Image: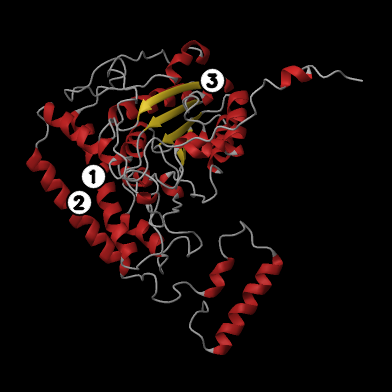
Amino acid sequence: MARDPVPAHLKKNLPPLSLYVPEPKFRPGDTVDFTQVPIPTAGETRRPEITDDAQSFTDLAYQLVRVLDEDNQAVGPWNPRLTPDMLRAMLRSMAQVRAFDERMFRAQRQGKTSFYMKCTGEEAVAVSAAYALDYEDMCFPSYRQQGLLIARNWSMVDMMNQIYSNSADRLQGKQLPIMYSVKEAGFFSISGNLTTQYPQAVGWAMASAAKGDTRIAATWCGEGSTAEGDFHSACTFASVYRAPVIFNVVNNQWAISSFSGFAGAESTTFAARAVGYGIAGLRVDGNDALAVYAATAWAAERARTNQGPTLIEHFTYRAEGHSTSDDPGQYRSAGEPTAWPLGDPIARLKAHLIALGEWDEDRHAAQDKELAEMVKAAQKQAEANGVLGHGLHQPLDTLFDGVFEEMPWHLQEQQAQMIAEETASGRPWARK
């Protein structure tokens, strides 16, 4: 019979067990003070060689890669030394994303679509990465990386058609609004189930390597999604097989209504997830477009030269609600977005270009006006194909399309039966 290792008289002196429940520092009505957030000096984080072993720079998972300093200059070993033309292109893409978001947010409020998600304050995470990756590389996004498509010059009309689920929607109304799928632009179908894209990205990257290809994969998820099993399965496979993939964790401090502490942010960084798997890990200022570009380019070169995967934590902030279905005023202080110490990615890149003498406020204002008009024109063109509330936009029998690569016989029979019944009834939704 086993003995009790703790004598009864000692148990009486032990405190009762308790659980720790994370609590955000600021709630509605609180005054915000982010001085406790450690912000290292720009340029001080070292940059390892591409071929360095991941275990030799585990310290970078706990630091912060920054390039733009307080004087709006690009400094340090991570400075990608981009040309003014490239910087202006990145600035334009980020500003276009913001204009697109504003227009589509209003469209949802006007009842033209059921749902929308903005990426305000996080534009650099997707846009800078798109410029650092090759166009042929495959992206496996979450639902806040519309900047990938904008930066790859994809049609805004096509994106809006999907948001409206109208007659020109390439997905025939089968996806929720903003869950795009654009194979031609290397943009894998967005999934509403969190982090399913992670193992998919690893599988695609492994297949690319198995075929002797040169293309790599990149994938994104929010910090809360790192608690999903798919995240850890993906990291295991990527580590074991040294898959050419970049894992992007967008730590914007908040899930839909719970702060990052519920995913482990109070214990360690999200980049530290990489250390346990023996893969390269970086923590990056997600509001510094140059830092995001530099980290992505570095990780891409590692992947392309068979050095294995990299996990990048983008330290940023969700400036607005999780989606149009969310009211952040119910769970966080209204002062948080403006108090965030890493600022706004568009404003910071604009200030850098101005400091270089390559931009000015008048040109920026003119560009904002031009982009707003361009987005407005795209919206008008998309709405000519229909919006929410205008009835069924796709023939009913198209619900069978795009589900299987080769439609099984029993679905072919059901589709034929539906067409026959719809045609006989005289209803207009059968495909002729």
* Residue projecting furthest to the bottom: 425
Vertical relation: 232 (above or below) 108:
above
Residue contact at pointers 2 and 1, CB within 8 angstroms: yes
Q: Is residue 65 left or right of residue 228?
A: left
N-term mark: 2 or 1: 1
Q: Residues within 10 Å of mark 2 (few under 14, many from 20)?
A: many
Q: Is residue 137 left or right of residue 150?
A: right
Which labelled disc corresponds to residue 95? 1
Tag in front: 2 or 3: 3
- Alpha carbon distance from label 3 to label 1: 35 Å
Vertical relation: 162 (above or below) 62:
below
Which labelled disc corresponds to residue 275? 3
- The spot of residue 119 in percent (x, y) is 34, 45
Task: Give the colour scheme of this rendering.
Answer: secondary structure
Which labelled disc corresponds to residue 371? 2
- The spot of residue 431 in percent (x, y) is 52, 76
Amino acid on which disc 1 is placed: Ala
- Alpha carbon distance from label 2 to label 1: 8 Å
- The spot of residue 132 in percent (x, y) is 35, 31
* Residue projecting furthest to the right: 1
